[in-house]
Amino acid sequence: MGKMLHGCGEVENGRAIAPSSTPWRMPDEAEPHRCTWMAFGASGKIWGYEYVEEIQNNLAAIARAIAAYEPVKMLVRPDEYELAAGKCGADVELIVCPLDDLWIRDTGPVFVTNGQGEKAAIDLNFNGWGKKQKFERDAEVARFVAQQAKVTLINTDLVLEGGSIEVDGRGTAIITESCVFNNNRNPGLSKADCEAELNALLGLRKIIWLPGLAGYDITDGHTDFYARFAGHGVVVAALDPDPTSPDHAVTQRHLEILRSATDADGQKLDVIVLEGPTQIRPGYENDEFAAGYINFYVLNGAIIAPQFGDIQADRRAHDILTDLFPEREIVQLNIDGIAAGGGGIHCTTQQEPAV
């Protein structure tokens, strides 16, 4: 990595040097939001024309559910504006923007704040999860959102996605190695250089690295399908109970790592297991179907989480999330169309923190 001019100061050898008096920090998702960003970006070329309407309906349902608690800003192609308006309703603000796809957790910026009440947005150089998919328009989404939010854009040489980063807002992050240290994103990157850059960008003091699983899905194993913070020192983690699944062994390994880990303050983590369903509704079954509850979204006053038609597993997930977030309402949605594409609710959202 060379030296470049960075949104929060100079960068040397890939490390962002934020002003010492105003270091940037990525807030915990549970901290107050100004709004949620989404993208009405389902494409028939990518998803298959027979599925697009269901994907759009899922996106609209998520947007409407969130809009009951906080503002939603939905990016939309100009030729789909009226369609999106009809599905999303008057409570969702539509903003015209060129799009390739809908995964704004990965294409959009990661927002950070500082102690001076300032906010900035980090462009993580989205490259289609290692150039696996068309991404020219989506590569510009982070910059576009920063402009719309009227905040400084922070640049970095790192290539990764928001879905691979989970933080507690207190200096600890959980990140999957399978995404960051992948030659399709950051060839030759050393762990030390990566940690220095992420520490400065996100206000981190400790990164807990999970191995993840490269090549199994298009993301190469994003953190937000494996482990999420649910309070100071509390992590909710996935376990794939199917011994024939490639995720079975890796989720077991993740639990071993998390149970032996401490956060940036030296506190041992309390790890809560949240197993996926054992069955799903008929109609969208495929090898990519993301049948897990970890990909929930935390917003002002609520948790938006999936349900898959497995009555016992759906109820168990509801009860666990209620225990973890007692002051928030748990709203479960059928997102089978989106799940069939390998994603979830968290993947379709990006929080902009309040300051």
Image (cartoon, rainbow, N blue to C red):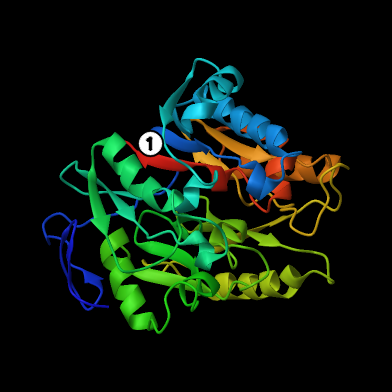
Q: Nearer the viewer, residue 102 or 119?
A: 102
| Rendered residue at 55%/17% (across/down) | 89
Please provide percent x and percent y for residue 234: 52, 56
Q: Secondary structure at mark 1?
A: loop
Within 10 Å of the Cα at label 1, are there few (<14), some (14-19), or many (20+) other Cα atoms? some
Q: Residue at x 38, y 81 (%)?
A: 189
Residue 329 lies in quadrant: top right
Q: Nearer the viewer, residue 178 or 81?
A: 81
Quadrant assignment, res 3: bottom left
Left/right of residue 33 with respect to residue 24 in the rendered view: right
Frontmost residue, 230 versus 75:
75
Question: Is 2 situated above or below 318?
Answer: below
Q: Is residue 202 above or below residue 130?
A: above
Q: Is residue 77 left or right of residue 250?
A: left
Residue 159 position in % (x across, y down): 40, 66
**Which residue does the numbered mark 1 point to in the structure image?**
32
Q: Is residue 31 visible?
A: no
Q: Give the residue displayed 67% in from the left and 37% down from the top.
A: 55
Whole-percent x and y of residue 302? Answer: 54, 32
Quadrant of the frame with the N terminus:
bottom left
Q: On the image, which quarter does residue 127 sit in? A: bottom left
